[in-house]
Image: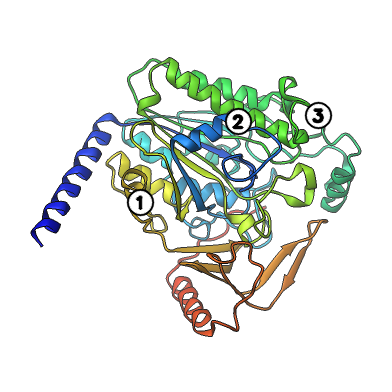
């Protein structure tokens, strides 16, 4: 008993000492969020044709999470969940008709929401956002209205504002893209603006150089010599289709144009690491690398990979929600592979804990005990929403789909109204439906769903305002 008490006191003291150091140091924080990068798109997660040496090195030197989930399986709600730590249903960043925000949308992330940038700005950080926003293009919804000191990037997805009239029809666009006709890889066919704070500085933006320019902007932020700690949210526009890459990477990868795009993103990460080391900030910088959702498989070789996980972007299967995620902090986070549950919803609460703010969001968990001491993750459940509807729940190893929704090659939904239960520990690919084998588990998960829905306040949709 005495020995156990001494161990407890030692661990508690160590924990307080470490977090006391973290609070004093106020680490710089870089959050890198890719667009539609699949679970199987990095060499540290699956065999690939293209090369990702910088990210593989980051994974080897940090924590590689193998069961980490996006807040949603499409852009807008996922990004809202990442920055607020709340399920999108609570912030209005969901839609019954529209799955994401569009250039004609009148809504966006409400200003009343406490974003990660607002939290860090209040804690003395300089805050910068580089890349794709997609939480509202009107002035009151832009990053500079949500706690970011500066913004450089595009306000929504890089495939929006399509110019050819025939592309106004989604099915025609998909067909054209798949067949490779009508100049779909000409950036001039997408009237997407590049913004500096609230001003449009280039339209259409030359998407061939976007990743390169994002990287240069990020390095400039890293190299600033002021004494403030910084928060950099770098949200790459790629590998969301249409795919673009700079001349240096064109045709260089064995993985085709998709591989070129991933290799340029990997190069970008490498450049950030070099910049941090050059200005002696690497040891005091927490780097988080993740994706907003799974790949868009219907675009075939332009759509990424799930490493065999079922489903894709816009589904509630693992391929749509489970994403590659790496936490790196030299000298603070010991290298490990974490085979436990985590979510983009947890990043807000985790960072809050690290800087000493101690604010937990209603849907987020503090992952810092796992990051620094490899303790068990506190998260034991994942909720899978599509638009405004809860489609599935995971608790522990078991995942229950109330109904199954697939996406066809044409982008249409294929709905199987039958419930399905999967044991993800034995069957991560969701192939074997064991719902008849475990009726009690199904009943228990349905009860969990009911309790969740009864206690979840739904806010008016911002995505359907148009």
Q: Indicate the quadrant where residue 207 lies.
A: top right
Disc 2, SS:
helix
Residue 40, image x, y percentages = 64, 47
In this figure, which residue is indicated by the disc labeled 3? 188
Disc 3, SS:
helix
In this figure, which residue is indicated by the disc labeled 2? 266
Disc 1, SS:
loop
Residue 464 visible from this viewpoint:
no
Q: Is residue 298 above or below residue 442?
A: above
Which of the two discs, 1 and 2, sits closer to the camera?
2
Mark 2 and mark 1 in contact (Cβ < 8 Å)?
A: no
The colour scheme used to paint the residues is: rainbow
Q: CA distance from mark 2 to mark 3?
A: 26 Å
Task: Left or right? Give the position of 215 relative to 187.
Answer: left
Q: Is residue 173 above or below residue 233?
A: below
Front-most of residues 151 and 445? 445
Task: Left or right? Give the position of 316 relative to 173.
Answer: left
Mark 1 vs 2, N-terminal side: 2
Mark 2 vs 3, N-terminal side: 3
Which residue extends farthest left?
Answer: 2
Assess disc 1: are there few (<14), some (14-19) or many (≥20) residues with their C-alpha within 10 Å of its C-alpha: many
Residue 29, image x, y percentages = 41, 33
Assess disc 3: are there few (<14), some (14-19) or many (≥20) residues with their C-alpha within 10 Å of its C-alpha: some
In this figure, which residue is indicated by the disc labeled 1? 366
Mark 3 vs 1, N-terminal side: 3
Residue 278 visible from this viewpoint:
yes
Task: Left or right? Give the position of 65 relative to 244.
Answer: left
């Amino acid at each position: 008993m005495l020995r156990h008490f001494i161990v407890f006191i030692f661990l508690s003291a160590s924990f307080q000492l470490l977090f006391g150091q973290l609070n004093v140091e106020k680490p710089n924080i870089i959050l890198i969020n890719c667009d539609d990068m699949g679970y199987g798109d990095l060499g540290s997660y699956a065999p690939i044709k293209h090369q990702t040496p910088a990210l593989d090195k980051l994974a080897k030197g940090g924590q590689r999470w193998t069961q980490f989930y996006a807040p949603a399986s499409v852009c807008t709600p996922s990004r809202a969940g990442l920055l607020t730590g709340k399920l999108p249903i609570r912030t209005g960043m969901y839609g019954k008709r529209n799955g994401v925000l569009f250039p004609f949308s009148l809504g966006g992330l409400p200003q009343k929401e406490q974003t990660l940038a607002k939290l860090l700005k209040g804690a003395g950080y300089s805050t910068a956002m580089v890349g794709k926003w997609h939480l509202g293009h009107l002035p009151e919804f832009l990053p500079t209205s949500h706690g970011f000191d500066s913004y450089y990037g595009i306000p929504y997805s890089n495939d929006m504002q399509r110019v050819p009239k025939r592309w106004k029809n989604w099915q025609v666009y998909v067909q054209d893209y798949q067949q490779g006709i009508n100049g779909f890889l000409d950036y001039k066919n997408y009237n997407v603006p590049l913004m500096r704070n609230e001003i449009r500085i280039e339209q259409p933006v030359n998407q061939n150089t976007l990743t390169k320019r994002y990287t240069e902007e990020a390095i400039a932020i890293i190299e600033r010599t002021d004494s403030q700690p910084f928060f950099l949210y770098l949200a790459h526009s790629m590998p969301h289709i249409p795919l673009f890459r700079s001349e240096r990477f064109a045709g260089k990868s064995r993985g085709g144009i998709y591989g070129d795009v991933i290799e340029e993103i990997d190069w970008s990460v490498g450049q950030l690491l070099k910049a941090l080391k050059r200005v002696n900030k690497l040891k005091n910088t927490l780097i988080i690398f993740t994706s907003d959702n799974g790949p868009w498989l219907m675009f075939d070789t332009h759509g990424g990979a799930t490493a065999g996980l079922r489903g894709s972007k816009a589904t509630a299967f693992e391929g749509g929600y489970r994403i590659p995620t790496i936490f790196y902090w030299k000298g603070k986070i010991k290298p490990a592979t974490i085979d436990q549950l985590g979510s983009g919803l947890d990043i807000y609460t985790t960072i809050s804990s690290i800087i000493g703010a101690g604010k937990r969001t209603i849907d987020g968990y503090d992952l810092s005990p796992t990051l620094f001491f490899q303790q068990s993750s506190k998260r034991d459940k994942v909720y899978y929403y599509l638009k405004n509807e809860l489609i599935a729940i995971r608790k522990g190893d078991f995942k229950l789909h109330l109904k199954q929704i697939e996406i066809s090659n044409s982008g249409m939904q294929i709905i199987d109204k039958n419930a399905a239960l999967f044991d993800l520990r034995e069957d991560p690919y969701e192939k074997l439906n064991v719902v008849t084998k475990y009726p009690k588990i199904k009943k228990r998960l349905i009860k969990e769903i009911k309790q969740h829905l009864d206690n979840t306040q739904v806010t008016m949709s911002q995505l359907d305002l148009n």
